[in-house]
Image (tube, rainbow, N blue to C red):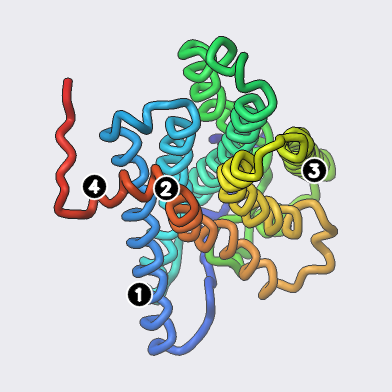
Amino acid sequence: MNASRGPTINSVSHFVLLGFPSSPEMQLLFFGLFSVAYTLTLMGNAAIVCAVRWDQRLHTPMYIFLGNFSFLEICYISTTVPNMLANFLSTSKTISFVGCFTQVYFFFSFGCDEGFYLCIMAFDRCLAICRPLHYPRIMTKELYTGLIIFGWSCGFILFLTPGVLISQLPYCGPNIINHFMCDPVPLMMLSCSEDNTTQLIYSTFNVIFITSAFLFILCSYALVILTVLQMPSAESKHKSFSTCASHLAVVFLFFGSVIVMYVSPSSGHPVRMQKIVTLFYSVITPLCNPLIYSLRNKEMKAALRKVFGSERLVHKT
């Protein structure tokens, strides 16, 4: 991304991420806690990816979407946590200008992709439960392959414009960001000149994307609930609700914190609260997702037991 707009030359070559200011002992404690959380997140999501890849019973659209979503979670958390861990052990806590905006672009692009994937998974469940007889004919390999490509690419395309606009603002100091990651809002506040157009584009992008994705998911599950309530068998109702419950839990974990951060008025959020909310959807949610999906799904639990247990999976070609 370009570092300047027009004739303005940036005097800032790096930014300082304050993170969570505390004593050296507390910094080491934070390093230990977040190292464990990051490792567990990588292991949990990688286990789901491997289970979907190796178990033939999970080669269905629902689990293929879940496998891609888990891999996306690995990419998402890896854009911020490694740098945050390094800063816990550093006294300078700096990140280069290019590195900062690279982090912004990938973090928010992967975040948008997560929203798209949650929509895709909601659409898949809605179609499977509301139109079970037509599902195999509609959800063909071509369609779910297209949805996978759509889910991975749209975030990178959509966030390109606001990402470039923010990076082209003039920065001439100060360069201290009171956050553990490069976030667009404090970055725009550090700019030498106030650009209302860039702020409007960024805010509009957040509101439209988050609200439209969340409403799409809610509408999808409203149709699911109406269909399930009409089922005559209590066993069928329980199975359908159980299938969707884990996905809904992830939806509310992710969108709940994101809505608080980016849709509600930011002026009402103290800096400490902004850090906590960002920590929740960028670290805690990816950590919880493998537990939510594996604990409520018998097929996934069986596949994960084969990944971790003594019963070895043999991949047949």
- If the image is split into quadrants, where does the N terminus sit? top right
Q: Nearer the viewer, residue 44 or 35?
A: 44
Secondary structure of the residue carrying numbered label 2: helix
Query: Which numbered disc, 2 or 3, marks the residue closer to the eye?
Result: 2
Question: Which mark identifies residue 264?
Answer: none
What is the C-alpha distance between the residues marked 1 and 2?
A: 41 Å
Callout 4 amino acid: Lys
Q: Nearer the viewer, residue 17 or 149?
A: 149
What is the C-alpha distance between the residues marked 3 and 1?
A: 36 Å
Q: Which numbered disc, 2 or 3, marks the residue that appears first in the sequence?
A: 3
Q: Which numbered disc, 1 or 4, marks the residue that appears first in the sequence?
A: 1
In-image side of 55 versus 122 (left or right): left
The residue depicted at 29 percent of the width and 40 percent of the height is 50
Tell me: residue 199, above or below residue 27: above
The reply to whether residue 160 is visible in this rendering is no
The residue depicted at 30 percent of the width and 29 percent of the height is 56
Q: Position of residue 282 (x, y in %)?
A: 54, 57
Quickly name the residue at label 2.
298
Question: Which mark identifies residue 207?
Answer: 3
Q: Which numbered disc, 4 or 2, marks the residue that appears first in the sequence?
A: 2
In-image side of 44 versus 223 (left or right): left
The answer to whether the residue labelled 4 contacts the one labelled 2, judged by CB atoms less than 8 Å apart, is: no
Q: Which numbered disc, 3 or 4, marks the residue that appears first in the sequence?
A: 3
Query: Which numbered disc, 3 or 1, marks the residue closer to the eye?
Result: 3
Tell me: residue 177, above or below residue 138: below
Quickly name the residue at label 1.
89
What is the C-alpha distance between the residues marked 2 and 3?
A: 37 Å
Q: Quadrant of residue 157?
A: top right
The residue depicted at 67 percent of the width and 47 percent of the height is 170
Secondary structure of the residue carrying numbered label 3: helix
The reply to whether residue 197 is visible in this rendering is yes
Quickly name the residue at label 4.
306
